[in-house]
Every structure is written in C-alpha cells, then in structure tokens.
Amino acid sequence: DSGAYDNTFSATAIADNDVPARVYFDTTVQYEIPQTTLSRVQVYGRVTNVFDQDPPVLANANQNSAPTNTALYDVGGRSFVVGARLDF
C-alpha cells in the first residue's frame, strides 16, 4: 500500500470551509482649534482595530507569511495615530 493514493471522499472527509466572521472597529477624532495667527490648526487621533481582534486562522492560507488571508483581514492588530495639521 505504500504510495497508493486514495481519492475517495466521504461526508466526514470534506471540510465545511466555514470561516468565522470578523468585525473591526475603528475610531477617529479631530478638533480644529480657533486661531488668529495661523489659517488653521487641527489636532487628530485615530485608533484602528479598537478591540484588537485577531484574524481567523485559515487552513489554506500561505503558511510562510501568516495563517490567514492578509488581503482580507487585519493582521497588524491595534494601531494608534496622533497628529496635527497646520496651515500658514
């Protein structure tokens, strides 16, 4: 039997290919400061993936880079951005 290939499948041999849903919450806040010396002063902040949801593990994903589909799911986790915009 060494090297024999069995291509028969039963109902229990087939994966149901069910991938659990993921919902990512992002938030952005910005505030424009009233200013007379500059045209505009604005401060802002952004948080992506607020609840730090992990992507689902997929059996057919590229195992060399990540065990999920990196084009569809957030693999970076939670991230923060803070900044200011100034117009002179």
Image (cartoon, grey):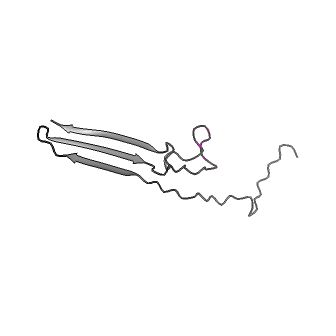
Q: Nearer the viewer, residue 69 or 7?
A: 69
Residue extending farthest to the bottom is 11
Residue furthest top as drawn:
88
Q: Which of the two residues, 45 or 59, is positioned nearer the viewer here?
A: 45
Q: Position of residue 61 (x, y in %)?
A: 60, 46
Q: Is residue 65 magenta?
A: yes
Q: Which residue lies at the image location 34% right of the left edge and 40% below the top edge?
A: 82
Residue lying at the far left of the rendered structure: 36
Secondary structure mostly seen in magenta is: loop
Q: Where is residue 70 shown, x and y percent of the image? A: 51, 45
Q: Position of residue 23 (x, y in %)?
A: 48, 57
- Is residue 52 found left or right of 19 in the rendered image? left
Residue 10 point in image, percent of width and height: 76, 62
Q: From the viewer's perspective, is residue 20 above or below residue 76?
A: below
Give the left or right position of residue 9, taking residue 76 as reference: right
Highlighted magenta segment, given as a residue range: 59-66
43 on left or right of 55: left
